[in-house]
Image: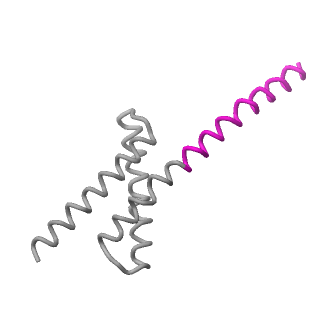
Amino acid sequence: MILGIRRARRAFALCSIPAIGLWVGLVAVSVLFHAPAEGVAAFLVTSAIGRVLAIAQAVGVVASFLGLFLSFRLDLPTGTTVVATLGGLLALVVIGRGLATRTR
């Protein structure tokens, strides 16, 4: 009985390590997609570096949570949905910037 539990723990550990590595890799790739778009969106809104950093973080958090929500709600792939949501937010900022400069 004890031998069976040890084998099960080893099997679980061997299966968990690649899954954890895959998750860490997904987070790293997600950051590579997020960083440039967040920065562009923030620079379109303001040029003060403190505000740029705050806006970039806010855009990233909103895009991540909205993308995760849509992913689970619509049964879509998570990474793709988060990146598409970030692209949509960036498009809204570009459109808003264009409308704001047009009315001046």
**Residue 71 appears in which quarter of the rendering?**
top left
Which part of the image, by quadrant, shows the C terminus?
bottom left
Is the stretch drawn in magenta largely helix, strand or loop? helix
In the displayed structure image, the side of residue 91 where residue 81 appears, left or right: right
Asked if residue 5 is positioned above or below residue 85 in the image, the reply reads above
- Say which residue appears at 39% left-offset and 77% top-offset: 51
In magenta, the rendered stretch is 1-28
- Say which residue appears at 61% left-offset and 46% top-offset: 24
| Foreground residue among 57 and 8 | 57
**Residue 73 appears in which quarter of the rendering?**
top left
Asked if residue 88 is positioned above or below residue 104 in the image, the reply reads above
Asked if residue 104 is positioned above or below residue 19 in the image, the reply reads below
Which part of the image, by quadrant, shows the N terminus?
top right
In the image, residue 58 lies at what x, y percent? Answer: 41, 65
**Number of numbered discs visible in the structure rendering:** 0
| Residue closest to the far left | 103
In the image, residue 47 lies at what x, y percent? Answer: 35, 78
In the displayed structure image, the side of residue 86 where residue 79 appears, left or right: right
In the image, residue 8 lies at what x, y percent? Answer: 79, 24
The reply to whether the magenta stretch includes residue 71 is no
The reply to whether the magenta stretch includes residue 15 is yes
In the displayed structure image, the side of residue 76 where residue 91 appears, left or right: left
- Say which residue appears at 24% left-offset and 62% top-offset: 94
In the image, residue 92 lies at what x, y percent? Answer: 24, 58
In the displayed structure image, the side of residue 100 where residue 59 appears, left or right: right
